[in-house]
Every structure is written in C-alpha cells, then in structure tokens.
Amino acid sequence: MRLSLLLFAFWVVAFNCTAQSPKKSLLSAVLMSPDSVPIPDVAIINVRTEQAVRTNTKGFFQIEIVEGDSLVTNHITFKKRVITEANNARTLLLEPEIRELQPIDVTTDNSQEEQQMNEMAQSINQIAKQKKLDGFDRKSRQTYFYDQHGSYNRGFSPHFGPTVGIPLGKITRLFKRKSRKSP
C-alpha cells in the first residue's frame, strides 16, 4: 500500500512538472517599407497555432507567443519574413516583391457568335454609306455659323465692334487733299 501511494505521489509530481504550460510572452514590432513608411494591414501568422493578427495604420502589431514560436508576415506587395522572439520591440523592414502577371489571351470559342458580330458590322457599314446625316455638310455648318455669329455683310459686332461702311472714294479724297496742302 505504501508503495502504491509512493508511486501515485511520484506520478502526480512528475505530471505537474511536465504538464505546466509554457511561458507566454507578448511580441510587438513595427513593420516598415525601405522608404521608412509604416505598412498597414500586414498579416502576421503564428506558424504553430495559426493565430493571425494585422498591423494597424502605423505598422504596429502585438501578438502573444510561446518560447520557440515563429511568426511569418504575409502581404501582397512585400516578401514574406520570419519573425522570432529576438525581433521583439524592433522596427522591421520588409522588402518589396515584384509580381509580374502573365498575359492572358482572350478568344471566343464560339464561332457562331463571331459570325453574327461580323454580319452586324457589315450591315452597319452598308447603312452608313447609304445615308448621310443632315446638317453636317459644309454649307449647313456655314449657314449655322452665320445665323449664330453674324455674316460677313453684317459684321461681327459682338467681337470686333460695329462695322461702318465708308465708300472708298471718300477715303482717297482725304489723302489727295493732304498731299496737295503739303507742297
């Protein structure tokens, strides 16, 4: 009986030593781009627990970890980076990742739709050649301009002031009189 009680006590002590939860700590850091700009909305994922947090607008994040946990950053425009306890309370730089998209060739598999589109384009071209719209020929545009802004006979008084008609004979007589008086 003593032996079983002693084994039970030993088992309880051993179980308590191994069953203690690991020491948790709080890891926090700020994520920046190479231009020293904080990066918002970066996902930080704990690899062991798959718990995730995101950085705020100032690039700051805080997550609870256990000794030996590793964190991975995930953002569409930056390369992934592993964060450990050694990076606690630091400013970390993330390198940009250039992603080049492959070109996509969009073709129609349905030849019937393509044939209908070609027929419609041909019919539009035939109709366009047969009938011209009214009011877009040169004479119609000139008439519209004259009606709106005045003709050459009436002058363009809103733009250049009133037009005064002086016969050419009166102007030439003025110059002739001045030239006679000079000698």
Image (spheres, rainbow, N blue to C red):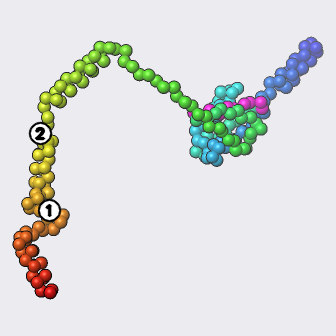
- Measured as percent of width and height from the top left, residue 180 is found at 11, 84
Residue 156 is marked as 1
Q: Residue at x 27, y 21 (%)?
A: 117
Which residue position holds label 2? 134
Give the amino acid type for the residue marked by disc 1 in the picture.
Answer: Phe
Type of secondary structure dominating the magenta stretch: loop
- Looking at the image, residue 136 sits to the left or right of residue 36; the answer is left
As drawn, 161 above or below 47: below
What is the distance, in whole Å, between disc 2 and disc 1 at their CAs? Answer: 27 Å
**Image mark count:** 2
The quarter of the displayed image where residue 178 is located: bottom left
Q: Is residue 77 above or below residue 182?
A: above
**Which residue is depicted at the point 68% across and 41% down?**
93
Residue 182 locus on image (x, y percent)? 15, 86
| Quadrant location of the N terminus in the rendered image | top right
Q: Does 67 sit left or right of 8 as displayed?
A: left
> Position of 33 compared to 115: left or right?
right
Say what secondary structure mark 1 lies in.
loop
Assess whether residue 70 is covered by the magenta stretch: yes
Q: What kind of residue is marked 2?
A: Asp
The magenta-colored residue range is 67-76
The residue nearer to you, when weighing 68 against 151, is: 151
Q: Residue at x 22, y 22 (%)?
A: 122
